[in-house]
Structures are given as structure tokens and as C-alpha cells.
Image: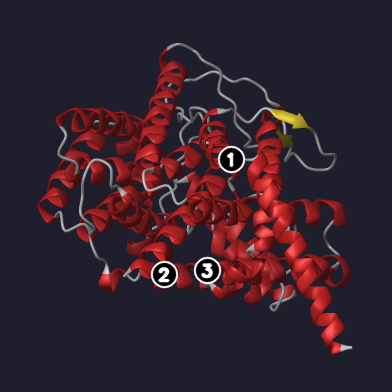
Amino acid sequence: MQKNEMSTHSNIQIYIIKIYEKFLQVFEPSFFKFLVTALLIAIPLYPKFPAIRIPGIYVAIRLEDFLILFTLLIFLIPMLINFKIFLKEKVPRAIILFLLIGFISTISGILITQIVVPSIAFLHFFRRVEYLSLFFAGFLFIRQTKDNSFFEYLLKILLIINLFVFLYGFGQKYFNLPIIITQNEEYSKGVALSYTAGAHINSSFAGHYDLASYLVLIMPIFISAFYLLKDKISKIILAISTLLGFWLLSAAVSRISIVAFLISTTISLFLLKKYKAIVTVLVISVIIFGFSSDLRVRYGRIIEVVRQKITSVVIVYAQEDGNVNEDRSTSIRFNVEWPRAMRAFYKNPLLGTGYSSITLATDNDYLRALGETGVLGLLSFLLIFITLFKTFNIYKFDVYEHSSNNLESVFIASFVGSTVGILMTALFIDIFEASKFATIYWLFTGFVVAKIIQNNKLT
């Protein structure tokens, strides 16, 4: 009986492998590369116009969701074939555990705390599945194609994207190009807005925080590559792209993202042993950001709030038009969003109250995880990054031989730095729920983790 079962199991494996081989014959590696390129371009550049409205919630299904679904269906057979490989690696295991706990938390929110609408709760859960599944697509792409020039190709794509993001953002501010955001139910219908003086620029993203976080992810790549590549034309292109990124960061007026960018870039250059460059970049950054009057006002406002807290002096000065001396973002977090997340946590400390139970905004990814998925959800979320940093192995970070066609070390070092910056941003923003950023971030994570594992096997 056991032999027959083993024989049947073996025949099934052989059959699946044959299907997979035929699958690869139909879809050449270049097709996988085309899909990845389509994701890299469409996600950041296509504005968030709704394709299908969902009753009861203002999160809509968009065209980029169909592209992601199609990509995942194409990668589905490789994912199933390589499932055992995922279970052998720490980061994929941690992601699978997080999703499993998220699923259990969703069921708990429906059956135990009973404060979520099942359809909406599962929609939020499957959003997380969608975002994180791109890790597996990116991981398998690097593993399957073994394209040694891919990171050079990726840099070129990112430079092109950055140019178009800048042009659209510049057009919003000076040529009245439409602004599409999803900050409330009315705007999420695809209402086209216009720039007004003092507003934030979001370019093709759904909000200025999404844009700024995306820049925290890619700008350290441009800066690190600038200091490592020796080709003059490449340096000029990278310098121009970096300046465009500086303008976008200033126009987005995201205080936490500015700090995250400086920390991310510093870590990236430190890992690449470009110590003098750190000072240069910091000085240039302070000068450029210092020219932004909006940034000066916003930083001044938060400094004033902190000063008032420290001195325990409450100063409320209301003018005739009703203006109050306060920092609105800080007040909303401290007085509304964060207490709401903690109340959800108290109702079910182990599993939280389920996805969608504390609305779409908490402005702290860790408190959001704690409120929606409890201690187990938060710990499994943090476990992803603990295993990720173990994979980075920054204490033994080895710089490769650098040339114009070997940019692996640039991407790895920059991604390490960017991840630190993003984790800091997550203290004040639900950045891992922002679809445009989260999908790109997890796709990048798959690229980098797969490449590190490949390199470790070669040493």
C-alpha cells in the first residue's frame, strides 16, 4: 500500500514537471521579464482611477490589480513547483506565517468580535495577499531567469519612471495637470483635482506620502550608483535623476520621508564604504530642502508642538478666522487614530478585531497590525523584517567588484538602507497598506532576497 502511494505521488510530480516544462516553452524568460517590467512601469505611473467600485467601502479594484492578477496567474505554476523551496527559506516562511495569522484573525473578527463585515474583511485580507504575493513573483523571477544584467536593466527602467513621475508632478504644480488621490470616499471615485498654492504634490501616486515613500526606496539607488559607477554619461544621468527626486521630495512635503531618506541614503553609502559621500549628500540635502518654504513651515510647526509639550505650556491662540496653533497631523494621530487602534487591541489582544475593523487609516503600521491582528499578527509582521535583516547579514556585507554592468551591490545596499527608512516611516504612516508603494516594495524584496541567496550559494 505504501509503495503504491509513493508511486502515485511520484507520478504526480513527474506529470506536474512535464506541465511546467511545456509551460516554460510557451512563456519564454523574456515574457516573464516583460511582465515584471509592466508591473514596474504601470504601478507607479498609472493614476489610481477606479475600475470596479465595491459597495460599502471606498477601496476600488483598479486596472493595475488586473495586471497583478494576470502576472500572478502566469507565475502560479512556478510558485507551486517551488513551494518546498519557499518553505526552506526564512523570509518566505515568515511571509506565509503572517498571511496565515492574518487569515485566522479575519475569521476571528467575523466570528468572535463580530464587528467587521465579512466581505469587506476578506477584501482587506486579500489586499495583503496581493501585495505580498509579488515577493514570490520577484523571488522566482530572479531564480528562474538567472539574468546577470537584470539589475542594470532595472536601474534604466527606474530612471525612466523617475523622469515621468517628475514631469507629471511638475505639470500638476505649474500646468494644472489633474491630481487623483484616494484620501476620502469622494476623491477615491476618480475625481480630478487641481493644485492649489501650499498643497502637496503626489504626481501619479494616490497621495504625497506614497510618492515620498517610493522616493525613499529608489533615490538611494541613484545616489549609490552615482558614487560607484565611473562612466561620465551614467554619472550625469544619475545626477539629473537625483535632482529630480530632490524636487519631488520637497514638493511632496512629507516630513518623516525626508528624515527616512537621509537615514536610508546614509546607511546605503556606509555599507558601500563611501564615507565621504555621506557628508556631501547630507549637506546638499539640507541646502535643497532648506529652500522649500512649505517644509520649513511644517518642520517649524512640529518643533513648536514638541516645545510646548516639553515645557508643559498649553498655548492656544485663536485668531478671528478660527486658526489654531497646532499640528493637525499630530493631533489626529494622538487623539483619534492611535487610541482607536489600542481599543481594538484591548478587545482581542491575541488576534485583534480583524482587517477593516479600524477603518482605512491608523497612521502607524505597527499599531494597525496590533489592533487588527493582535499580538500574533504584529509579531509575525515584525518577524518578516527580522528574517529579512538576517538575510542581509549587514555585519558581513561584502562589496562586489563594481562596474557599469554589475549593480547588484548597489541595489542590495540601497535596499537595506531603504528598508530601515521605510520601517521608520511606518511609525507615522500606513505605508504597507498603500498599494502603489507596497506592491513595488515587496517585488523589490523578492529580487534582493533571491539575489542574496544566489550569491551565498556561489561563495
* Residue at 65% in and 49% down: 75
**Which residue occupies the foreground of this view, 149 or 196?**
149
Which residue corresponds to mark 3? 91
Residue 105, image x, y percentages: 75, 69
- Looking at the picture, which amino acid does disc 3 mark? Val
Disc 2 versus disc 1: nearer the observer? 1
* Residue 8 in the figure: left or right of residue 167: right
**Name of the residue lying farthest toward the bottom:** 1
Residue 359 in view in this figure: no
Which residue corresponds to mark 1? 28
Mark 3–mark 2 contact, CB under 8 Å? yes
For the residue carrying disc 2, how many other residues have a C-alpha within 10 Å: few (<14), some (14-19), or many (20+)? Answer: some
Q: Label 1's element? A: loop
Residue 133, image x, y percentages: 63, 54
* Rendered image coloring scheme: secondary structure
For the residue carrying disc 1, how many other residues have a C-alpha within 10 Å: few (<14), some (14-19), or many (20+)? Answer: few
- Looking at the picture, which amino acid does disc 1 mark? Glu
Distance (Cα) linking label 2 and label 1 = 30 Å
Total residue callouts: 3
Residue 391's tag is: 2
Distance (Cα) linking label 3 and label 1 = 27 Å
* Residue at 44% in and 27% down: 165
